[in-house]
Structures are given as C-alpha cells and as structure tokens.
C-alpha cells in the first residue's frame, strides 16, 4: 500500500472523537449592470449585497456583471486604500476573490467609481477547536493538556519530544497558501523562548502573545504544510510524580550512605 495512503488513514484514525471541523464557505457579491453610472448614488447599492457578514476563513468573490471595468479596493473613498486587498481593474464577466484570515469590519470601494462602496463583516470565532491529551507520550504519561487551536486543515496529532524540547503538530487534508495555525500552548506543556519550524524549515514571521500561563502563536502556513514543530527550553516534565519520588529517595539514600561512610572513616581513624 502507498505510504501516503497509509499516512492519511492513520491521520484520520488519530483525530479525537468530537473533533469539530470547520468548512469555509465562498460568498458571492455582484457588481450590477449600471454600477458605473453615479445617478442616484445616495440611494442605490453598487455591490449586491453591499454589506455581508461571513466567518473567519471564508472567501468573498465579486463578479462583474456591469459593462464597465471596476475594482474592489479595501478602504474608503475619503481616506483611500488601506492595503488589505485590491483587485486592480477587472472587466465585465471577470471576478475577484479574497479570503479573510482576520476578523473585523472591512470597508471597500471602487477606485474608478468612488460612489461604489461596500462592507464585509468577518465574525470572530468564539469557540476554538481542542486537541486532547497532548503530552501523554512524555514523562509518565499522566501529565496531559487540552490544546486549543484554529486551523483550516485537519490537525491529526501532536507529539512531544523530550530530548529536543519540542512539540510537533502533524496536519492532513487540503489547506490554502494563506492558512494560519493559531494555537494556545500552556506553559506547563512547553515554555521558554519559542522557535518555530514549518516542514523542517525555521520561520520567524509568526506572532506570539503571552496571556498568563498561555502562549498563543499565530503561524502562517501554505497549502502544502504538513508539520509544525515548536521548540522551547522545557516541555512536559520528564519526571512524573512517581519518578520524582524515586529520584528523591535515591538522593536521600546517597546522602545517608555518604554520611555513614564518613562516620565509619572517623571511627577507624580514632
């Protein structure tokens, strides 16, 4: 059997029960016939619908049904473009698509016909997905964590490497070149200055925020990304409670033996 097929089957089997996969949608906006005519601009809508509410990771596609060329440019006619997206000029029968990777309100307009304005509201996802029992492959296997994350692709597993002080996430499925992996990492799972590798290549263009006992990382991915490795200075404690107790007893035994030997030496010397 092909290795890729085996990996895909194993990855699907590793997905936790109750795992919630979000499916991104594509929303259509039409530039109607006559949009280039500014007549009754105060009462007409020149993008249909002119206001749209979508989810994070959704795509909006603007189709030009007019007889003139137009643009879909983020910003507003007063302040000008804000640089978030810009279709440049596209003609009749053509379309422009943009995938929204951040939540918020995004105004846009046509740079050629400034009376044409619209708005896309991107809702923030309140409930993140959860990967359970991260860390069960480290230490005594009893110190585990539920890791919250957002990802367009399927997150198949997370593996803790105690020697490398790393947590490696494995992904499967189809993504996009502007995908993001947002993950909340408990500091008891991994801590220290965090370094990130995507498919064995170190990257620096990720964002990190510190929220008490949680480090939140926002990591850019491509459609072909398969692994994300996060390296710190400590990971799940290598010594669980039982191991710590045994280690402590061993130290006490060594100290006791050393004290006994020292006493015997003094007695023999006398």
Image: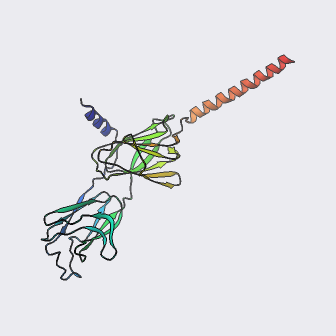
Q: x%, y% of residue 145? A: 47, 44
Q: x%, y% of residue 170? A: 36, 41
Q: Quadrant of the C terminus?
A: top right
Look at the picture and state if 185 lies above or below 94.
above
Direction right: furthest residue: 270
Disc tally is 0
Q: x%, y% of residue 20? A: 33, 50
| Residue 7, quarter of the rendered image | top left
* 36 with respect to 267 (left or right): left
* 245 with respect to 50 (left or right): right
Look at the picture and state if 113 lies above or below 251.
below
Look at the picture and state if 25 lies above or below 250.
below
* 199 with respect to 166 (left or right): left
In percent of the image, x 59 and y 34: which residue is there?
244
Residue placed most toward the observer, 160 or 71: 71
In percent of the image, x 26 and y 60: which residue is there?
98
In percent of the image, x 22 and y 70: which residue is there?
49
Q: x%, y% of residue 71? A: 22, 68
In percent of the image, x 45 and y 38: which residue is there?
160
């Amino acid at each position: 059997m092909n290795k890729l097929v085996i990996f895909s089957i194993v990855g699907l089997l590793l997905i936790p029960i109750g795992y919630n996969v979000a499916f991104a949608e594509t929303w259509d906006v039409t530039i109607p016939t006559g949009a280039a005519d500014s007549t009754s601009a105060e009462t007409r809508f020149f993008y249909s619908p002119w206001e749209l509410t979508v989810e994070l990771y959704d795509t909006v596609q603007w189709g030009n049904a007019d007889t003139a060329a137009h643009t879909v440019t983020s910003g507003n006619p007063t302040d000008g473009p804000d640089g978030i997206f810009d279709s440049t000029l596209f003609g009749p029968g053509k379309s422009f698509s943009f995938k929204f990777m951040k939540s918020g309100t995004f105004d846009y307009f046509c740079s050629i016909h400034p009376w044409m304005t619209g708005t896309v509201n991107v809702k923030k996802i309140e409930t993140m997905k959860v990967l359970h029992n991260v860390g069960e492959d480290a230490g005594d296997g009893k110190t585990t964590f539920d890791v919250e994350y957002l990802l367009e692709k399927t997150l198949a597993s997370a593996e803790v490497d105690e020697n490398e002080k790393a947590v490696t996430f494995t992904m499967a499925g189809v993504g996009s070149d502007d995908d993001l992996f947002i993950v909340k990492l408990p500091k008891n799972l991994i801590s220290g200055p965090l370094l990130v590798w995507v498919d064995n290549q170190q990257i620096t263009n990720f964002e990190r925020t510190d929220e008490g006992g949680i480090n939140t990382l926002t990591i850019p991915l491509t459609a072909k990304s398969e692994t994300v490795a996060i390296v710190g200075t400590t990971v799940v404690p290598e010594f669980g409670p039982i191991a710590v107790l045994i280690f402590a007893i061993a130290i006490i035994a060594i100290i006791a033996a050393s004290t006994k030997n020292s006493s015997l030496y003094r007695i023999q010397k006398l």
